[in-house]
Image: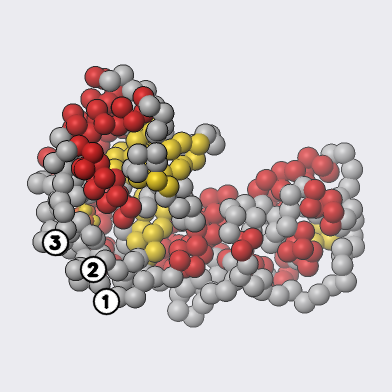
Amino acid sequence: MHVAQKLDILAAEARYDLACACGPSQPRVRGPLGRWIYPAVLPGGKRANLLKVLLSNACTRDCAYCAQRRGRGFPRAGFIPEELAAAFVEMHRRGQVTGLFLSSAISGTVDEAMARMIKTVEIVRFRHGYRGWVHLKILPGASREQVGRAAELANRLSLNLEAPSPSRLAALSPQKSFHSHIYERMAWIQNLVDSRAGRCRGQTTQFVVGAGEETDGEFIRLMGDLYGRLGLSRIYFSAFQPVRATPLEGRPPAPFEREHRLYQADFLLRKYGFSANELVLDENGNLPPGVDPKSAWASRHPEFFPVEVNTATREELLRVPGIGPVSAGRILRRRRDGRIKSLDDLKRAGAAARRAESYVLLGGRRPVPARKVQLSLWAADCVAPGSF
Ligand code: SF4
């Protein structure tokens, strides 16, 4: 099979692994040659177009949700490391991509598949002299030596947990051990990240949402642990979509709204100072539908409001629906030059003033006649990270 055909198959197959920094709402874009190229925001805010590709889609495992599972009938392909390295470097030389996101199915043993992935990056780095961004997936069960080598070569590593507990994972991926194949490796990676010995400066993970019976609360408790104890850089969520000819093909797709709410909860944990046990869950253990998690918290805590914008701490401002990390910072800076007197002042600071008005005081006065605090209805402007 020609390299271009392999690239078409294996870059398209990478769509099933959504753990890229482009977020859930941004579409994958077709690059100039029809390849699958993903917009991403790198740490530090730089934008990149990543070639996201599998080294192989021929898997020896049979995870219930996965398109690449063994025995499923569809075109299989695999690169040898030299082929993919040369194809990527050529695309980079032409300016079609600015980074590489390399993953793979487990073709053969974990050891063999991981060795081929590492070799690909070694060739890219040392034979072709590429110094740019590489995100390398670590396969569950990879050896300590391979994890160490990957951390020397790649800027970012990721290992997908897929499910929020050992029993949930066992139901989906019977050959993967939650603790010994994944969580333990994540701790190794984090030690390497913290040591700053290699190139790797962060790790991420990803969950499939809705492939099992798990609740949002299970994800959220684990997220608190992953950010708090393990120090992960990001957690990604992928709403389950049934794939033909898999055991879960008859299962309904998970709503993207659920994926979106988990991302909102994720922002509250990472950027707003919330802890996992503060997030409001409904009687089923899920984030309440139709309301963003921050407004749900506010409706449960009327004693916290109204917040006086002119004297509140950053932490207090971040609890106000409509004020995010950026607008809280601007409010604090503007206060040095004078008081915040009106909703227009709040707007100029970048806050969603209409959302915030029920929750704040401006100079000891409510900006509008006091209204009953209501749960915000789901609205498109909740989508932007930092605006809720
Ligand atoms: S190991 Fe990975 S590629 Fe293989 S079936 Fe499981 S999820 Fe799919």
On screen, residue 144 versus residue 44, left or right, reads left
On screen, residue 280 versus residue 30, left or right, reads right
Dot 2 amino acid type:
Arg
Q: Distance between the residues labelled 1 and 2?
A: 8 Å
Say how the picture is coloured.
secondary structure
Identify the residue under disc 2: 244
Identify the residue under disc 3: 73
Between discs 1 and 2, the one toward the N terminus? 2
Between discs 3 and 2, the one toward the N terminus? 3
Residue 273 appears at what percent x and percent y? 59, 52
Identify the residue under disc 1: 250
**Please, which residue is most extreme toward the front here?**
33
Residue 166 appears at what percent x and percent y? 27, 63
In percent of the image, x 60 and y 55: which residue is there?
Answer: 384
The one nearer the camera, 21 or 30, is 30
Q: Which of marks 1 and 3 is in front?
A: 3
Q: Residues within 10 Å of mark 3 (few under 14, many from 20)?
A: few
